[in-house]
Image (spheres, rainbow, N blue to C red):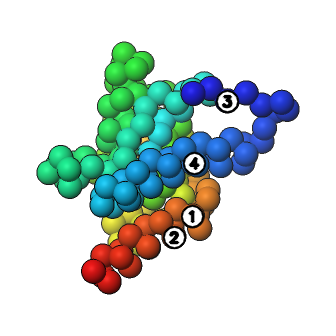
Amino acid sequence: MIYSFEENPTTEQTDEIYMREALKLAKRAFDEDEVPIGAIIVSQGKIIGKGYNLTQRLNDVTAHAEMQAFTAAANYLGGKYLKDCTLYVTVEPCVMCAGAAYWTQISKIVFGVYDDKRGSSKFGQLFHPKTEIKNGVLEEECSELIKSFFRNKRDK
Ligand SMILES: [Zn+2]
């Protein structure tokens, strides 16, 4: 999908638009009773990779949203490095996904909300030194989705 803007959008505006796409995927995960995290990868204004958490359906602890988005983007580009790409993910990447992001050398990572328990920042700076990190985009919506998921789990 390519977005066309009448005027040049600010970085904040484009970040919110893409985070909304990641949120749509997170909601799909929610509907499938998966931990609701969604991710997309954007290169030159185009979404080239998508993923949402599928650890239950695939019985695979590595099936995090980011991992699938990395694989899809690398397939699209025909190369393992994701230079000039941005990952949008609704929740802070875990250690595994931060490690995978390191190997991709991705240019930028934008996430919605910190994960106070499993977020990689709890374990040091694991991203590639070249990777720019931004947080807090649509933070409330990203946070509310994940909280309501675990609230529902508790109430069942
Ligand atoms: Zn992860």
- Are dots 1 and 4 in contact, CB under 8 Å? no
Q: Which of 16 and 34 is in front in this view?
A: 34
Measured Cα–Cα span from mark 4 to mark 3: 13 Å
Image x and y of residue 62, in percent: 22, 48
Say which residue label 4 marks: 19
Q: Is 64 above or below relative to 83?
A: below
* Residue located at (57% from left, 27% from top): 1
Label 4 CA crowd tier, 10 Å (few <14, some 14–19, many 20+): many
Specify whether 90 is left or right of 57: right
Q: Residue 3 carries which label?
A: 3
Q: Quadrant of residue 78?
A: top left
Q: In which quarter of the image is residue 70?
A: top left
Three-letter amino acid code at the position of disc 2: Glu
Three-letter amino acid code at the position of disc 3: Tyr
Measured Cα–Cα span from mark 3 to mark 2: 27 Å
Give the quarter of the figure containing the C terminus. Answer: bottom left
Image x and y of residue 142, in percent: 52, 62
Judged from the image, the secondary structure of the residue bearing numbered disc 2 is helix
- Are dots 1 and 2 in contact, CB under 8 Å? yes
